[in-house]
Image (spheres, helix red, strand yellow):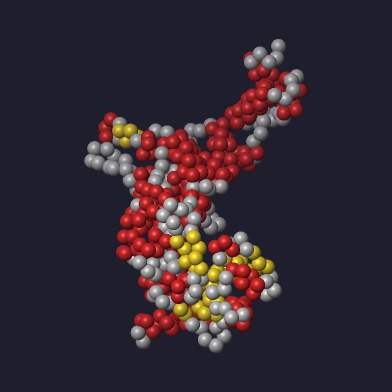
Amino acid sequence: MSDRTALDSRASLLLTDLFRRVAPVVDDLGGLFAANGHELALVGGSVRDVFLGRTGNDLDLTTDARPERVLEIVRDWADSVWTIGIDFGTIGVRKAGWMLEITTYRSESYDPKSRKPEVVYGESLHEDLARRDFAVNAMAVKLPARDSIELVDPYGGLADLAAKVLRTPGPPERSFDDDPLRMLRAARFASQLGFGVAPATFAAMRDMAERIEIVSAERIQAELDKLICGRYPREGLRLLVESGLAAFVLPELPRLRLEIDEHHRHKDVYEHTLIVLEQAIALEENGPDRVLRWAALLHDIGKPKTRRYEAGGRVSFHHHEVVGAQLTKKRLAELKFPKDVVTDTARLVELHLRFHGYGTGEWTDSAVRRYVRDAGHLLDRLHKLTRADCTTRNKRKAQALSRTYDHLEERIARLAEEEELAKIRPELDGNEIQEILGVGPGPVIGRAYKFLLDIRLDRGILGKEAAAAALRDWARENGLLS
């Protein structure tokens, strides 16, 4: 049996298994479209994922029917319908627990100066497949498939799946010119699937990287976020950097490739960053943590701006965490990330070096409380990022750092049990402060609150009487009480 025959045989078995699951819905719908004089096919990622063993309840379908006609056909059949994507030819349908997106045959192209794709409807399935991003996504199964399952694969997508390679259905230059975001998608699929990129496709990405600038920040952000949360993000990031795309969408990353010469010694920051990302991922407990991953990727982006050459051939990066936090906030905001993601990621970058002041455990309980207080809800992520940031090849040094952080976590746990660190508040509330000072609401109350919080962090639990006495002393020193 030839390799090709073996591949087709396995493909047939996989498709048959898929249709055992989806036939009650998609074959019924395919029959409905046929009865109304229209074609329907399962397409794209839904077909690709069958061969990757990743089938879910979300299916993509394509048809020659225009969106308004699709609505007429499915309105009485579906459990619910939504039209949020109708401007791009897509109608959403929910049926018996399945989520279906039905898109009219189409092609997309960009005006050279436009950020929005122009949708042009097509007339045939083959024409629709030709405009898909990669051959592995340019396969379809015609519906209904009650008697036989027909795989439509005009561009060799099945063979590309077997070879784990990404290749455009037609000339890559034409594909990327039509929609430059496809170049970024190549990196995203490299991260999600672990696939490589065909040489001609990579060459076009490298030559046309600047074209990505016409794509909106929102679309770029969506692809980068999927990339960073993929199973193999190093592969996707490497592709971004080596193709030159990163210079336009995430320029801080290639800037980490600092020159190292025989006179000045420091780590390869770019390679260190990728290792930290992988080590952070290994510490995840419940699937991809986008904030942790972005913080790991960006934690050292302040180093290029803060690099200084010191005596004895050493190199320093003083305050790179502060500069890095500012750069992180700026980059993620420009990419239109949600505000909480921007704030949390930047905060982790700012705090990622704090542990290194711990030495061999010299911190007072006050310093430990402040560490927890400053980390807030990010404490668990900060633990993971700090541990991931140890990439030394010196096993004794690595073990010593790990033991020291174990000790810090033990102290945090002990203090948390004794004092409920996550809920640290001054021992007097605003009303009590006003009563003691004999003043109403205003800036003085805020200053007093901060003073009481500081002594709570420094000295632990004092009790209300001692806290009130300390407040009165502070007020007299500041001329607020006689």
Front residue of 365/191: it is 191
Horizontal side of 132 relative to 455 (left or right) equals: left
Q: Is any atom of residue 115 visible in this view?
A: yes
Q: Is any atom of residue 382 visible in this view?
A: no
Horizontal side of 441 relative to 60 (left or right) equals: right
Q: Residue at x 66, y 23 (%)?
A: 443
Front residue of 67/371: it is 67
Front residue of 151/278: it is 151
Coordinates of residue 453 in the picture (x, y in percent): 63, 29
45 above or below 209?
A: below
Q: Residue at x 47, y 80 (%)?
A: 151
Q: Residue lying furthest left in this view?
A: 262
434 above or below 304?
A: above
Q: Splitting the image into 4 quarters, where does residue 145 fall?
A: bottom right
Q: Splitting the image into 4 quarters, where does residue 427 fall?
A: top right
Q: Residue at x 64, y 15 (%)?
A: 478
Give the position of the C terminus as an image quadrant.
Answer: top right
Coordinates of residue 176 in the picture (x, y in percent): 39, 60
Q: Residue at x 40, y 80 (%)?
A: 7
1 above or below 88?
A: below
Coordinates of residue 393 in the picture (x, y in percent): 34, 48
Give the position of the N terminus as an image quadrant.
Answer: bottom left
55 above or below 387?
A: below
Q: How many labels were placed on the picture?
A: 0
Coordinates of residue 329 in the picture (x, y in percent): 49, 41
